[in-house]
């Protein structure tokens, strides 16, 4: 079986992750809405994991997590570990038990994005003992969750197009 399109598809995913990292880490490039900027690499890793098998999905999750950890600098390892495990599980679940659809992708992206950002807030803001946690969450993290989710819808269609156009038959 010829796997030439698999390599091209993985290269396209890698370039997407790199481009999204550059977009999200460049100051004043993506507008801040209601106090929050999107974390584009979370929905990118999730939507890639919906289409790919476990091991490649895990590596795309780990690479997205490494870039997120490096971009934010104060939490080395959090996103790397969590996105690696989540993407591995998503690749396994959607390969064997579920069908990739817009509704499933939207539900998983919403739940995982909300869970990861809230978990990050819990570990690195509340447990760190920083003050005014409720005010900070309402003014920055809720808009970040919604903004990230909305970008995830666009990334689902992008990754679906990449997967379908570069599928090995």
Image (tube, rainbow, N blue to C red):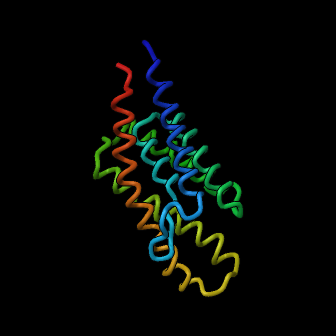
Residue 51 picture quarter? top left
How far across and down, in percent of the image, does residue 64 sit? 57, 47
Q: Residue furthest front?
A: 28
Q: Residue furthest top?
A: 1
Residue 18 picture quarter? top right
- In the image, 69: left or right of 98? right
Give the total of numbered labels.
0
Q: Is residue 140 above or below residue 153?
A: below
Q: Nearer the viewer, residue 138 or 151?
A: 151
Q: Residue at x 50, y 76 (%)?
A: 35
How far across and down, in percent of the image, does residue 103 sit? 28, 52
How far across and down, in percent of the image, does residue 113 sit? 47, 60
Q: Residue at x 71, y 57 (%)?
A: 76
Q: Residue at x 63, y 78 (%)?
A: 126
Q: Is residue 42 above or below residue 54?
A: below
Quarter containing the N terminus? top left
Quarter containing the C terminus? top left
- In the image, 130: left or right of 153? right
Q: Residue at x 58, y 53 (%)?
A: 82
């Amino acid at each position: 079986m010829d796997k030439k399109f698999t390599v091209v598809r993985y290269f396209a995913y890698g370039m997407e992750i790199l481009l999204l990292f550059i977009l999200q880490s460049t100051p004043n490039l993506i507008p801040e809405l209601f106090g929050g900027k999107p974390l584009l690499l979370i929905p990118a890793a999730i939507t890639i994991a919906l289409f790919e098998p476990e091991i490649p999905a895990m590596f795309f999750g780990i690479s997205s997590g490494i870039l997120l950890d490096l971009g934010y600098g104060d939490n080395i390892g959090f996103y790397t570990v969590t996105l690696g495990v989540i993407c591995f599980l998503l690749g396994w679940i959607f390969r064997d038990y579920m069908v990739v659809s817009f509704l499933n992708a939207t539900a998983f992206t919403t739940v995982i994005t909300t869970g990861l950002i809230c978990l990050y807030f819990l570990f690195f803001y509340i447990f760190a003992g920083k003050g005014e946690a409720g005010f900070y969450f309402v003014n920055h993290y809720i808009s970040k969750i919604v903004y990230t989710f909305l970008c995830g819808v666009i990334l689902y269609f992008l990754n679906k197009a990449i997967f379908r156009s570069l599928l090995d038959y």
